[in-house]
Amino acid sequence: MLRPPRLRSTSCDSSRAQRTNGRRRADGSHGCAASLWVPLVVCLYHETPVLVQVGSEPMVWFNRDELGHALLNVRMLTTPGHEMDRIRIQDNDFIVRGTPTDLECPPSGRLLRVRYANGDYMRVEFREIRSLQAASRRFPQIRQDALAVVCRDWPLTFVIVTMSAGGTSVRFGPTLTRLPRGNVMKGCVVSHCSVGLVFG
């Protein structure tokens, strides 16, 4: 069972509630809906509790509460030494750490975006898609017949995650996944696995 949980800010350790270039900054009052449909690193993860794992540590995963609702968790991709200074999502609460140079979560609650001075970047977008045809247009890198196998009950809420580590070529995004040693992934569908992707 899935509900539309709200992402909430539980910590904002500096006065970053402001407007810059017309965008509203995080003020701890906005929310986002989540589900288990996650196009991440140009792969579609369905009913897979741990989407991405680095070594033995999960990076993107879902927990469930006592009623079975999905709770989104994300550890931001970064380089060694910065892990404790980066925003994270913990059971639908986002926790601001360090000093982002850009932080946005609009009142609609469908977007969380953050950037740090060294180039670390994360964007989490929540989007309802109402049909297989609309999903194929939004994710053209994934074959429509592969989508049709796992996406049957429309509309569906998708969580689109983009991350990159500053100073490296490692990137998760809507067009490709670039992993260490030049490995690239495109157009995968992962369903009913315990872990979707492990690297590092």
Image (spheres, rainbow, N blue to C red):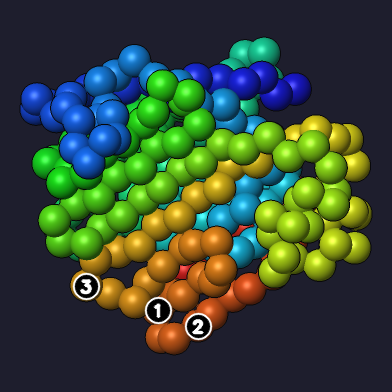
Element on which disc 1 rests:
helix
**Left or right position of 82 against 15:** right
Q: Amino acid at mark 3?
A: Gly
Amino acid at pointer 2 = Asn
- Name the quadrant containing residue 27: top left
**111 relative position to 9: left or right:** right
Instruction: Please state which of residues 100 and 199 is positioned toward the viewer in this rendering.
Output: 100
User: Quick check: 31 above or below 80?
Assistant: above
The reply to whether residue 107 is visible in this rendering is yes
3 vs 1, front mark:
3
Residue at image location 74% in from the left, 57% down from the top: 137
Furthest-left residue in this view: 14
Q: Please, is residue 47 above or below residue 89 in the view?
A: below
Q: Would residue 6 appear left or right of 11 to someone viewing this image?
A: right
Screen quadrant of the C terminus: bottom left
Q: Which residue is mark 3?
A: 167
Q: Earlier in the sequence, mark 3 or mark 2?
A: 3
Q: Residue at x 22, y 41 (%)?
A: 21
Compared with 113, 143 (above or below) is below
Q: Which labelled disc corresponds to residue 180? A: 1
The image quadrant of residue 87 is top left
Q: Quadrant of the N terminus?
A: top right
Task: Name the disc covering residue 106, or none.
Answer: none
CB atoms of marks 1 and 2 within 8 Å:
yes
Q: CA distance from mark 3 to mark 1?
A: 13 Å
Point out residue 70 in the picture as x, y percentages from the top left corner.
Answer: 61, 27
Question: Residue 69's image quarter?
Answer: top right
Which of the numbered marks, if any, corresponds to residue 183?
2
Q: Are marks 3 and 2 in contact (CB under 8 Å)?
A: no
